[in-house]
Amino acid sequence: MKTICREKDRILLSVAQMGGAEQKYVQEAFDTNWVAPLGPNVNAFEAALSDYLGGRKPVVALNSGTSAIHLALKQIGIVNGDEVICQSLTFIATAAPITYLGAQPVFVDSEAETWNMCPVLLEKAIQDRIEQTGLVPKAIMHIHLYGMPAKMSEILAVAQKYGIPVVEDAAEALGSSYAGQKCGTFGEFGVLSFNGNKIITTSGGGALVCATADEAKKTMFLATQARDNAPHYQHSEIGYNYRLSNVCAGIGRGQMEVLPDRVARRREVNRLYREILNGVEGISLQTEPNESFYSNYWLTSILVDPSQTGGITREDIRLACEAANIETRPLWKPMHLQPVFKTAPFYGNGTSERLFDQGLCLPSGTSLTDDQIHYVADVIKKIILVNQ
Ligand SMILES: *Cc1c(COP(=O)(O)O)cnc(C)c1O
């Protein structure tokens, strides 16, 4: 199978890898002239996703993960002036839809084990918001960073205690599970993304995992311009144009056939890095805390502690990789440090700032060869060992 590579020889962070059946389904869409939005590929893709997640929850395919977050918050009833609690250490797509609805994000720091939302700080933040505003925050948005499941039992316990719905951003975690349950199925809503760099892709796309058939129906309604049931075009509320096209869903159908292989390979890539970097002082990897946590290891990520590497920093390693034509990337810059959110409330403990300072995502695509992984890990090892 030929893999897509934008630059020859450069080792990229995470590239799309087709399985083989995608073109067949896309061709079907053309042969039947189902190139419009909706159609058989969309239905089959949604059914495959729902099955994969355990079959209990309906899934609606959308044109992006960001749209899915927007529709989740909209259906929870977030409106102008509401507060929504959001994990700070994430990609901006988790937080941006809060502001689309005129609401205020309240950022919460991570715990050091999974790098996800700290349940202790979450409760502190809720209590403080109640004290400050007299109101309970309207929703909790958390993620599973680079595929690592968050501490779901603890987060859900806090959410239940205060009666706050959880939106689970599982955009990076398709294939991950916690206590045997698939990520994306814990929240009132679950969010998936099929952007080009995710574990599977539709070139661009997303999905909303819903709790009930009614919610799924409402999601489809809002995603297709909120059209009332009438022969003419009639609208009683404002909707969006967020559905996935039948052509893109054909890619998704093919990708679903290889998803288990993709998860296995990402985990194997992670295992190999772990083996090679084992014992290198000052380098640690994001790691499953115990058997309850099963990560798809979408991106293998390391921390570089300069006090143990003889002064070598994350940035030194990033630049050494760059010189060796290897693409790496610092962890997401926390939202509370983003200029656009500088006035948003933040409940912190220093963890996400330290992770951002020390963290680096390594090339983790499923089409990487073992030799390429050895090459990347050796570049990292060399710069540290030379210095010690
Ligand atoms: C990729 C991603 C999204 C958004 O997905 P799009 O499909 O690109 O809109 C949301 N949240 C997180 C954490 C992501 O990594």
Image (cartoon, helix red, strand yellow):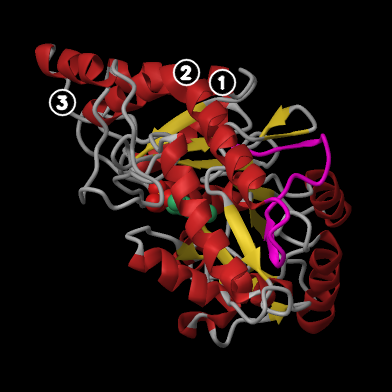
Q: Which of these two is toward me, 331 or 364? A: 364
Q: Is residue 157 above or below residue 245?
A: below
Amino acid found under the numbered disc labelled 3 = Val
Circle number at residue 35: 3
| Residue found 65% across the figure and 64% down from its top | 303
The C terminus lies in quadrant = bottom right
Q: Is residue 209 above or below residue 314?
A: above
Q: Which residue is mark 1?
A: 52
Q: Comparing marks 3 and 1, which lies closer to the viewer?
A: 1
* Mark 1 to mark 2 CA distance (whole Å): 6 Å
Q: Which of these two is toward me, 328 or 246? A: 328
Amino acid found under the numbered disc labelled 1 = Tyr
Amino acid found under the numbered disc labelled 2 = Ala
Q: Is residue 387 left or right of residue 251?
A: right
Q: Quadrant of residue 307?
A: bottom right
* Mark 3 to mark 1 CA distance (whole Å): 26 Å
Secondary element at tag 2: helix
Instruction: Please report the bounds of the magenta region as a residue range.
Output: 278-296
Do the numbered discs 3 and 1 sit on residues whose CB atoms are within 8 Å?
no
Secondary element at tag 1: helix
Residue 184, horizontal then vertical, whole percent: 61, 37
* Mark 2 to mark 3 CA distance (whole Å): 20 Å
Mark 1 sits near ligand 1, with its Cβ under 8 Å away: no
Do the numbered discs 1 and 2 sit on residues whose CB atoms are within 8 Å?
yes
Residue 299, horizontal then vertical, whole percent: 53, 48
Circle number at residue 48: 2
Q: Quadrant of residue 305?
A: bottom right
Does residue 205 appear in the picture of this structure?
Answer: yes
Say whether disc 3 or disc 1 marks the residue closer to the N-terminus. 3
| Residue found 24% across the figure and 38% down from its top | 4
Q: Is residue 73 left or right of residue 24?
A: right
| Residue found 37% across the figure and 19% down from its top | 43
